[in-house]
Image (cartoon, rainbow, N blue to C red):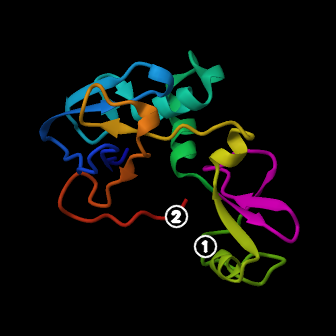
Amino acid sequence: MGLFSWLTSDTKEQIKIGEDKDIYLLSPGGGKSYHEDNYGGRGLFGTRDVYVHLCEINMPQLIGGIAELNRDVGLILAYGKVYYDKRTDKYYGHKETCPLEEVLPMEGDLNTKQSGYGKTPNELISEGVWDRMPTYILLLDGSEYFPIKIACTPDAVYEDLEEAEDDGYQGGDCQWVPQCL
């Protein structure tokens, strides 16, 4: 498991790993917020896993399911990408990050030529043939997406804030460059 960190939604401050600081994982609609006073980098706010939370606020039908599976769905909601071919009206992606039937398997990574195209996904995207889009668009089937929101104040209102941005420094001082999923 890797380290996860964000900038807070309200103040845009870096959430430093191991720093004594009160932060709150928020829920939409006035739902419960989860307090953490010394974030350890593992995605936990108190005993609440941020990715289980993301899954359950977006797909409440999965509440009470197996926590590891809900966490996997939350990770897919947060980071999964699919590629939409505008000419054929088909979706491509990696089954690990988008296990939906309507998504066709993509070969290799973004620099691997795709059968039937003779070009890489990066080339297809830059030429406007493919669009890159978040997996949640397919998973939620038109329902509203509720992103991760984290605040420094306990009375923050989910609906008043923007999504918490990923921290490129992962809660420390060294920049991490994410790989495309």
Q: Amino acid at mark 1?
A: Leu
Q: What residue is shown at x 27% (from left), y 65% (from top)?
A: 175
Would residue 95 appear left or right of 71 to someone viewing this image? right
Q: In the displayed orientation, state which residue is furthest to the right.
A: 88
Identify the mark nearer the N-term, 1 or 2: 1
Which segment is the magenta one?
Answer: 82-105
Q: Position of residue 42 (x, y in %)?
A: 31, 39
Secondary structure state at the residue bearing disc 2: loop
- What is the number of callouts on the image? 2
Q: What residue is shown at x 56% (from left), y 15% (from top)?
A: 64
Q: Position of residue 82 (x, y in %)?
A: 67, 58
Q: Is residue 11 above or below residue 93?
A: above
Q: What residue is shown at x 17% (from left), y 61% (from top)?
A: 173
| Residue nearer the viewer, 120 or 161 | 161
The C terminus, quarter of image: bottom right
The N terminus, quarter of image: top left
Q: Position of residue 6 (x, y in %)?
A: 32, 48
Would residue 23 appear left or right of 83 to someone viewing this image? left
Q: Amino acid at mark 2?
A: Cys
Q: Which residue is mark 1?
A: 110
Q: Is residue 76 above or below residue 90?
A: above
- Quadrant of the rendered image containing residue 8: top left
Residue 78 inside the magenta-drawn segment: no
Q: In the displayed orientation, state which residue is furthest to the top.
A: 64
Q: Which residue is mark 2?
A: 180
CB-based contact (under 8 Å), mark 1 and mark 2: yes
Dot 2, how many residues are within 10 Å of its Cα: few (below 14), some (14-19), or many (20+)? few
Q: Position of residue 168 (x, y in %)?
A: 32, 61
Measure the C-alpha gap from mark 1 to mark 2: 8 Å
- Quadrant of the rendered image containing residue 139: top right
Q: In the displayed orientation, state which residue is furthest to the left.
A: 20
| Residue nearer the viewer, 108 or 65 | 65
